[in-house]
Amino acid sequence: MTNFKNLAVPGVQLLKPYIPGKPIDELERELGIKNSIKLASNENPLGPSPKALAAAQAVMANIHHYPDGSGHKLVQALADKHGVDSRCITLGNGSNDVLEIIARSFLASCNGAVYSEYAFAVYPIVTQAIGAEHQVAAAFPKDHPTMPYGHDLDAMARKINTATKLVFIANPNNPTGTWLDADELETFIKNVDKNVLVVLDEAYYEYMPDDLQPNTDQWLQQYPNLIVTRTFS
């Protein structure tokens, strides 16, 4: 009998399944504890917005209808908020989905993707699945005075070569909690070859203090090889 797993493309065959964190109630039963606080899976400590709950309840009566696959209202709202053309907005099931769409659209087995050593797990996963080259830049060491395990943009720039099609940058970085100086980050983007796409992953951008948030809405108008991702996590 044919093992269907052997029919998968080589990159997918080498992937290891992602093991998510256990639900709190299951973990408490397993360990015999109560009132635990979960620090994994990106739960929002503030809880859902009352406006979000009200909006969800308002559409419950029409839950049997197909949703709008184009997300027209959401796309228009996002375009208005960020001051960009609605054609610049792509929706996904979380930023994971958008990051995978980007990789599958622009990477092939003959290409490479640059990302930092300690960055979001999806970057190596999507690169591996396509069979592209992992161009992993060393992060700052653990004894770095301000950004231990953070992105070293100089090291990332040195990894870019003729095979590179994508550069993934997380700001702030998941999972190390580090961030990049806005001027330094813009200088990096400005100097990247225009045939290389820079994917600036700004999940949790809203948790950064205002004075640390880069003006990436404006950067999108200036740098045609820049893609910015955000999340509603």
Image (cartoon, rainbow, N blue to C red):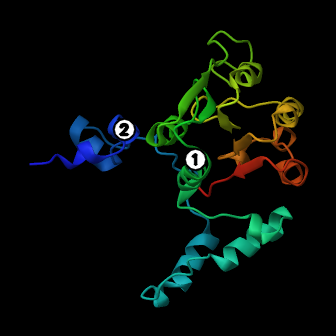
Q: From the viewer's perspective, is 9 left or right of 204?
A: left
Q: Secondary structure at mark 1?
A: helix
Instruction: Where is residue 33? Give x, y as percent.
Output: 28, 38
Q: Is residue 168 visible?
A: no
Task: Give residue 103's mark.
Answer: 1
Tell me how far mark 1 sits from mark 2, CA to CA. Answer: 16 Å
Local packing at callout 1 (Cα closer than 10 Å; few below 14, some 14-19, many 20+) is many
Q: From the viewer's perspective, is 64 left or right of 229?
A: left
- Which residue occupies the foreground of this view, 119 or 161? 161
Task: Give residue 10's mark.
Answer: 2
Local packing at callout 2 (Cα closer than 10 Å; few below 14, some 14-19, many 20+) is few
For the residues carrying marks 1 and 2, which lies nearer the camera in this image? 2
Q: Quadrant of the C terminus?
A: bottom right
The residue located at (61%, 58%) in the rendering is: 232
Task: Name the quadrant containing residue 173.
Answer: top right
Three-letter residue code for mark 2: Pro
Q: From the viewer's perspective, is 218 left or right of 153?
A: right
Q: Secondary structure at mark 2?
A: helix
The residue located at (52%, 36%) in the rendering is: 132
Q: Is residue 105 visible?
A: yes
- Which residue occupies the foreground of this view, 114 or 6? 6
Looking at the picture, does residue 162 appear above or below residue 90?
Answer: above
Instruction: Where is residue 181? Give x, y as percent.
Output: 83, 30
Q: Residue furthest left?
A: 1
